Amino acid sequence: MGKKDGAVLDALLDRFGRTFATEAGIKLADQPKPLYQLLVLATLLSARISADVAVAAARELYAAGYGTPRGMREASWQDRVDALGRGHYRRYDERTATMLGDGADLINDRWKGDLRRLRDEAKGDERRIADLLMEFPGIGPTGADIFLREVQAVWPQVAPHLDKRVLDGAGKLGLPRQARPLAELAHSGDELARLSAALVRVSRSKKSVDAVKSAAAAG
């Protein structure tokens, strides 16, 4: 890693290096509950709504007891709508409440509530995992990318998962725009997930790009 890349990386992670899972209060591990919570979060982040609202809505769902497939399945549709509303996820609350209920049915019925079984069915293949994730209501290519970017912290099989949005953010900071060289800047799966989340954030904001560049130059 060059001195310049190192300074940019340090400034980037210092300012924006929190995963979306961490913001939503998920203690991510290779266990059924946090993996399911990440799937719910990816579903919420897939809508045309701010990340802050999606994270807040996820927190409300978990606090209400809907952070497991069983809890989500046993909640009434109105219960889910109300929790989403408390997180201000209102434009999509009714449709999303239905999708989350249907998704809970799918994971319970097909994978016994455990996304590790989905990963094993896919034999750890990243593309096949993405295809299976997209069978969940509300998860398209964007949602699958969100899930994979975050889960690479605990699923080394899918790392590095650095999609176009991540690489676009890297390009704006002068970091490598190719997946392998960019991944080599991270020292662990956890740091790679943090790097991915940070680059997604700066890809959306010229102000954030400028802030990172200024901090890196000053450091």
Image (tube, grey):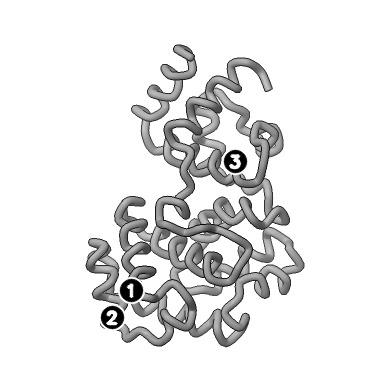
The image shows residue 40, relative to residue 156, as above or below, that is below
Which label is found at residue 191? 3
Spatial CA distance of label 1 from label 2 is 9 Å
* Amino acid type, mark 1: Ala
* Amino acid type, mark 3: Glu
* Residue 135 falls in image quadrant: bottom right
Spatial CA distance of label 2 from label 3 is 36 Å
Q: Which residue is the extreme one toward the top?
A: 218
* Amino acid type, mark 2: Asp
Which label is found at residue 155? none
Q: Residue at x 35, y 62 (%)?
A: 59
Crowd band around label 1 with a 10 angstrom C-alpha radius: few (<14), some (14–19), many (20+)? some
Mark 2 = which residue? 79
Q: Are marks 1 and 2 in contact (CB under 8 Å)?
A: yes
Mark 1 secondary-structure assignment: loop
The image shows residue 153, relative to residue 47, as above or below, that is above
Spatial CA distance of label 1 from label 3 is 30 Å
The residue nearer to you, when weighing 113 against 110, is: 113
- Residue 9, x across and y down, in percent: 55, 27
Q: Are marks 1 and 3 in contact (CB under 8 Å)?
A: no
Q: Residue at x 73, y 63 (%)?
A: 124
Name the quarter where the N terminus is drawn.
top right
Mark 2 secondary-structure assignment: helix
Which label is found at residue 64? 1
The residue nearer to you, when weighing 174 against 85, is: 85
* Residue 194 falls in image quadrant: top right
Crowd band around label 2 with a 10 angstrom C-alpha radius: few (<14), some (14–19), many (20+)? some
Mark 3 secondary-structure assignment: helix
- Residue 43, x across and y down, in percent: 44, 65
